[in-house]
């Protein structure tokens, strides 16, 4: 068993997958071409910190704190850092896997995921947020408890340096992709008329692309990805029988707004503490904030008697045909909704940071790094994304009605 675990966590396995997908280290590219690449191959560089344990980047060396590098020919002048160059030989796969990896990033949380609420059914969005929050919290906590490293670089090329400060196992991208794809599939069967086999194929393809993207970007070993998928599947299997009961509590109980805000806030403040800065705590707080805001918003809609969900007697509803008018209205909803959420994020983030900097006496010159302090990062992210969840679930559909695009 230990031999299999060592094999699945081996960095060379990831590097081999990258090479087969056309992402090649400069030295390997030089050997393959029989000499210097000269100007025949476009080369990319990415800063990687030398002499550090994978999964550990000190606060001063965190990518967001790293100073701009001086470009010299095909390399970079960086003090104390290794700057491996790489060649992209398969651009379609490069674009495909980077787009797939983006499904686990912050922009996805506040644009694509709410789109299910705007275009399909708020019920499905609520189910997705609930499942996504559970698997992401468990995955992030396990990362910081197990403290297992990410793949070594070299030989691996790492394309997402922001998350390199995090530990590796399990892959929360793989967990989120599995949870979102299959919870949507399971929940939609009673809400929308569609061919289950087609939905299953889409769920498998989307989750597989995200999982493979974690290998392609060099951020996870095969073991990290497999454990992420299996852990997400186990959590869904264990909780599935209670989804309906949780729905009733979330929407109808008078305790719901209190419990479903207090519990995520408590989990944010009690998140495991590391001896170095890692974005995992902030990212987890972001997710918990979204869940808290959506929970209060959906409870509010139920109390007001306007849920924007299809009537139960009409379920499962048939998907309407795609017409030019429907596509135009959908594009308008997406543009308005995403703009409102992004504007909400900017305003609430700025206001909460200003209030917290004032409260803790942070000087203007220290603002760039002070937000990483837990007493500032947790409340500002929780407040910001709780408001985003509220705006998405309560206000945006009403704005669509006002504009005549719902």
Image (tube, rainbow, N blue to C red):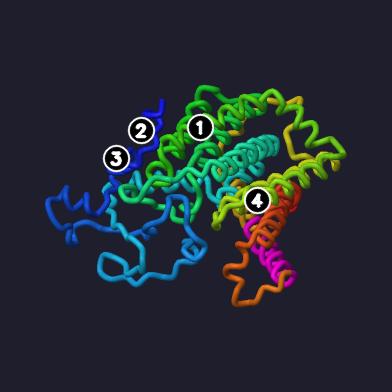
Q: Which residue is mark 3?
A: 16
Residue 152: percent from the left, percent from the top?
37, 47
Q: Which residue is mark 4?
A: 285
Whole-number angstrom distance, CA of label 4 to CA of label 3: 35 Å
Position of residue 79 in the picture relative to residue 401 (left or right)? left
CB within 8 Å, label 1 to label 3: no
* Residue 351 is a magenta residue: yes
Q: Which residue is mark 1?
A: 229
Q: Where is 317 relative to 385, above or below?
A: above
Q: Which residue is mark 2?
A: 7
| Secondary element at image label 1 | helix
Identify the mark at residue 54; answer none if there is no mark. Answer: none
Q: Earlier in the sequence, mark 3 or mark 2?
A: 2
Residue 293 seen from this side? no
Q: Which residues are magenta?
A: 341-359
Q: Earlier in the sequence, mark 1 or mark 4?
A: 1
């Amino acid at each position: 068993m230990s031999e299999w675990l060592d094999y699945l966590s081996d960095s060379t396995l990831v590097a081999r997958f990258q090479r087969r997908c056309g992402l090649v280290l400069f030295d390997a590219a030089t050997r393959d071409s029989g000499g210097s690449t000269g100007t025949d191959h476009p080369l990319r560089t990415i800063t990687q910190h030398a002499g550090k344990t994978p999964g550990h980047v000190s606060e001063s060396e965190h990518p967001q704190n790293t100073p701009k590098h001086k470009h010299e020919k095909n390399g970079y002048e960086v003090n104390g850092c290794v700057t491996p160059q790489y060649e992209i030989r398969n651009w379609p796969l490069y674009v495909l896997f980077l787009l797939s990896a983006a499904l686990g990033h912050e922009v996805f949380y506040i644009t694509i995921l709410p789109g299910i609420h705007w275009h399909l059914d708020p019920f499905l969005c609520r189910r997705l947020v609930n499942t996504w929050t559970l698997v992401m919290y468990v995955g992030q906590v396990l990362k910081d408890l197990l403290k297992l490293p990410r793949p070594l670089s070299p030989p691996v090329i790492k394309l997402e340096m922001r998350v390199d400060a995090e530990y590796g196992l399990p892959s929360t991208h793989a967990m989120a992709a599995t949870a979102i794809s299959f919870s949507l599939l399971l929940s939609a069967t009673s809400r929308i008329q569609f061919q289950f086999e087609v939905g299953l194929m889409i769920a498998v393809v989307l989750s597989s692309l995200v999982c493979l993207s974690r290998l392609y970007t060099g951020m996870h070993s095969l073991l990290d990805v497999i454990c992420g998928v299996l852990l997400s599947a186990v959590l869904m299997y264990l909780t599935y029988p209670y989804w309906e009961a949780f729905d009733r509590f979330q929407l109808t109980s008078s305790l719901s707004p209190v419990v479903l805000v207090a519990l995520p806030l408590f989990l944010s403040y009690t998140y495991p503490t590391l001896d170095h800065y890692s974005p995992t705590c902030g990212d987890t707080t972001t997710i918990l904030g979204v869940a808290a805001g959506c929970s209060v918003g959906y409870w509010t809609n139920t109390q007001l008697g306007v849920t924007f969900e299809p009537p139960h007697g009409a379920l499962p509803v048939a998907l309407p045909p795609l017409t030019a008018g429907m596509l135009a209205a959908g594009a308008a909803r997406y543009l308005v909704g995403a703009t409102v959420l992004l504007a909400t994020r900017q305003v609430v983030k700025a206001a909460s940071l200003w209030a917290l900097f004032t409260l803790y006496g942070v000087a203007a010159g220290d603002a760039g790094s002070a937000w990483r302090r837990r007493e500032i990062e947790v409340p500002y992210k929780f407040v910001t994304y709780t408001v985003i969840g509220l705006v998405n679930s309560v206000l945006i559909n009403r704005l669509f009605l006002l504009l005549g695009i719902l």
